[in-house]
Amino acid sequence: MHRLFLTGQRLLGLGEPQLLPQHLLRSRLGWQPRPSRFLNARPASTRSRPNKSIPPPNGPPPNASAHSAPSSRYSKLYSSAREPLSLLFTTVGILLGLHIFVEYFYSISGTWGISMLPTLAADGELLLLSHYYHHGRGIKVGDVVSFKHPLDGEKRAAKRVVGMEGDFVLRDTPGKGKGIMMQVPKGHCYVVGDNLKHSRDSRTFGPVPLALIKAKVIGKVKRTWFLLPYLERLPEPLQPAVLLDEGDAVD
């Protein structure tokens, strides 16, 4: 640059070398200063670097379709399998809830046999059973219970309780036999059918363990003429004790 100024000085015919400003050199010699390539340079710390996490503005990256294809395939499979799985889980939940309700709360069972006439019909009568009294919990004398038959575990029977543990009961049919009394052992109950002449009960197979009792008969399910069900309670067979006079006859 200094050499260029000296040349310009000689061409202009000046004596002592002087530094001329750039605009005079441009006007007289037509010289243009070369732009420096460092004028627009930025420090290395301030240079912007491309952000690879931000997609280009023109659209998705070239490999976007390759990455999105498996996810869309899995979403289709999930959407197609979601409906049957939801139906399956709903059905299993309903069946499990019904099983718990029938096993531990209430259930309805039909009658068959003449051992409980005239309280219960011989066939086709619906009974409401409460499983709260499972294993004899809360059972008392006079209740009608449903239990597993001691001689045949696959069958169920419904009889009336006439004695609890510690009670003395008549072992034979009233008016028949020797009239022997027996005490009901602990953890058992003595059951008899209302139709004494046609009933196989504790007079045949002895006292029933309380562990075999499954439910208590709450009542009979009846239907009106427009098919709406209602519950008919069983009649109370026990009557309060009455003190009789000496002259009163007992039938």
Image (spheres, rainbow, N blue to C red):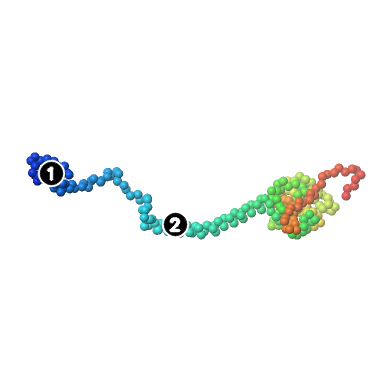
Can residue 127 be seen at all in this image of the molecule? no
Residue in the picture at 75% in, 46% down: 140
What residue would you read off at disc 2? 71
Residue 166 versus residue 243: which sits nearer the camera?
243
Q: Which residue lies most toward the right here? A: 247
Question: In screen coordinates, is 199 left or right of 250?
Answer: left
Q: Secondary structure at mark 1?
A: helix
Residue 199 occupies quadrant = bottom right
Locate the N terminus and report the quarter of the image it occupies: top left
The reply to whether callout 1 and callout 2 are in contact (CB within 8 Å) is no
Q: Is residue 86 left or right of residue 201?
A: left
Secondary structure at numbered mark 2:
helix
Determine which of the numbered discs, if any, sits on residue 159 in the image: none
* 161 with respect to 22 (left or right): right
For badge 2, the amino acid type reads Ser
Q: Position of residue 217 (x, y in %)?
A: 73, 52
Q: In x, y percent, where is residue 221?
A: 73, 55
- Between residue 59 and residue 205, name the one nearer to us: 59
The amino acid type of the residue labelled 1 equals Phe
Q: Position of residue 70 (x, y in %)?
A: 43, 58
The mark nearer the N terminus, 1 or 2, is 1
Q: Residue at x 66, y 50 (%)?
A: 104
Taking depth in this image into account, of 187 and 145 the one nearest to the observer is 145
- In the image: residue 45, left or right of residue 215: left
Residue at numbered disc 1? 5
Near mark 2 (Cα within 10 A), the count class, few <14, some 14-19 or many ≥20, is few
Residue 165 shows in the view: yes
At x 40%, y 57%, the residue is 67
In the displayed orientation, state which residue is furthest to the front: 27
Q: Residues within 10 Å of mark 1 (few under 14, many from 20)?
A: some
Where is residue 161 drawn, in percent x and y? 76, 50
